[in-house]
Image (cartoon, grey):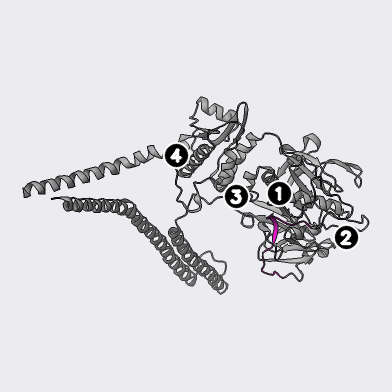
Amino acid sequence: MKGAATLGRRLSGTVALAALAIAFLLLPAALGALVGGLRLDLTADRLYSLGDGSRSLVSSLEEPIALELFASGELSRSEPVFRTYGERVRQMLEEMAAASGGGLTLTVTDPAPFSADEDRAAEIGLEPLPSGRGREPLYFGLVASRGDDRVALPLLQPRRERFLEYDVARLIHELDQPDRPVVGLMSTLPLTYGFDPLGQRMREPWAIVEQMQQLFTVRNVGTDATAIPAEVDVLMLVHPKHLPEATLYALDQYVLRGGRLLAFVDPSAEQDAAGDNPLDPFAGDGRASDLGPLAAAWGVEFDPGAVLADARHALAVEGRDGPVRHLGFLGFESDSLSADDPVTAALDLVTFATAGTLAPRAGSAARFEPLVTSSAESALLGAERFAAPVGPEALFEGFSPTGERYVLAARLGGRPASAWPEGPPEGAEAPADGHLAAAREDARVILVADTDLLADPLWTRAAGSGSARVIEAWAGNGDLVLNALDLLAGSEALIGLRGRASFLRPFERVEALRRSADERLRAKQVALERELAATEQRLLELESRREDAGSPMPSAEQAAEIGRFREERLRMRRELRDLRHELDRDIERLGARLKWLNVAVAPAATVTLLLLLAALLRRRARGAAP
């Protein structure tokens, strides 16, 4: 009987282990079948979860939209970055389709070379990515279609990965709302086509207006308007110099009612050369503009009498003796532009001229999000120094950087109060639905402390005139304006989207090893360069003391010095190679430990848990045995 009981317990233990093994193999499939639509995102920054704006957008589509992802299989196989990024794109599109409740459908197409799908990709206008190895072009683009209407992202670039969700949501919104947004243009500068009284000829519109007209319906709004037209989706306000109080009140109520505003102010507008007095354009504050009481109400500080000077970002202009750096003409590259906002993230260069600065107002609850920021080699100079007819060299006299970084463009938010809390000012009328003392919703305002960045010379080159005029952009000023208008003109869902964290996570420990090695490498390279310079100096001294000056053969002393340097250079190069090999060994050892953790530790932990569970079941079985 005892042997039978022991045999029974062994059989029960074996059966339990077999059952656990079967459950271990079948459980993932069973869970997938039961909760296939359930997704759990445990990543930092919730990389694989849609934002609320995207969910709202795709769940409220007026009609179904078909998404087609063109992804060349060869691109995925030959380019590791696109292989990883392609999986990220596909998962996000699947997440959008799942959240749409049937409003979005997703198809993935491999446009193989010489296939009908490749012809269709080219016909749609997708941008091919050459393989660089003599092979056929490769594609990785997205097309959204509804009936005969179609829009596309011609090439999904990994460098735009932070804004992947924004770009796709914008594509869907563009197809769902096909009417062009209306941009109201209120400006005291001559941006549009018209007659130039000084030159006695017709003037061409600024390049930025021509580009705006390709994407938006642009309508002029008078600088004396007492109300902003209802059909205006976004108002672009340029150089609001001495606006009537009734117009300022109209802007106040427009923003408080949820109106979207892109505003450009300037302490010294180079393009406003006439100022208040055409006979003396440099008198007074003739070239300055500001928002009057609106700036304080919106929680921002702007000094119309101060111009930013930045030694690090100063551009070269023509001076008396050739090119010279101008402290007021500035070029900001990507390290000075916000990488977290779609307005500036993809820009490489934006140029400003005699710009002002913005700052959050003390005690204000408004949001202030910088878009463009100066270097620490900056200071504020009086606007009168830039108005005086002197050369750029004079600006360096007395210039002393403060170490502070100044903001030149910002996005404003929050719920501001009216600049006229008691009601309309004298001469203005309240809107038909009554005066608002505070905002109904978050303000949608982007403010830039410069107007000259809109002028053609600061970002374009042009050839020809009229219909034959060709414009080439050498800076991203136009893109900044169009990005801002595009963002503000979008739905509330789009405005709420920001750049997401990158799925391409660096190995921090590896990067630390590389940085440490690079610092040591640089130190040795610097030492080698110093030794080379010292050797060259000693050789020159030896040459000057030679009795047989001019001989092509080195003296004995020179030959010995050259030999000594060669030996020193070989020694340092060996040290550099050893240091590089040491770095590689450290990285390989770290990789081996990670592989051990992935390959051995995780399975071992699983087996240990199974054995513990089996032991627990056997103990219970023994306890239950008679």
Kindly state the secondary structure of the residue where label 3 is placed: loop
Q: CA distance from mark 3 to mark 1?
A: 21 Å
Q: Nearer the viewer, mark 2 or mark 3?
A: 3
Name the secondary structure under disc 4: loop
Real-space Cα separation, disc 4 to disc 1, in angstroms: 44 Å
The mark closer to the camera, 2 or 4, is 4
Query: Residue type at mark 3?
Result: Arg
Question: CA–CA distance between discs 1 and 2?
Answer: 26 Å
> To which residue does mark 2 refer?
282
Q: Which residue is mark 4?
A: 37
Disc 1 residue type (three-letter):
Asn
Label 1 sits on residue: 477
Residue 263: percent from the left, percent from the top? 75, 51
Residue 309: x %, y % from top left:
73, 63
Q: Is residue 241 above or below residue 83?
A: below
Query: Tag 2 or tag 1, which sits nearer the N-term?
Result: 2
Q: Nearer the viewer, residue 371 or 25?
A: 25
First of labels 3, 4 by sequence position: 4
409 or 351, nearer to the observer:
409
Instruction: Residue 148: tell me if it is visible.
Output: yes
Q: Amino acid at mark 2?
A: Phe
Residue 277 at x, y percent in the picture: 92, 56
Q: Pinpoint residue 470: horizontal percent, then vertical percent.
A: 74, 39
Q: Of the two numbered discs 3 and 1 on the same chain, state the one appearing first in sequence.
A: 1
Q: Are marks 4 and 1 in contact (CB under 8 Å)?
A: no
Label drawn at residue 498: 3
Magenta stretch, main secondary structure, is: loop
Q: Which residues are magenta?
A: 400-419
Task: Check residue 68 for magenta coloring.
Answer: no
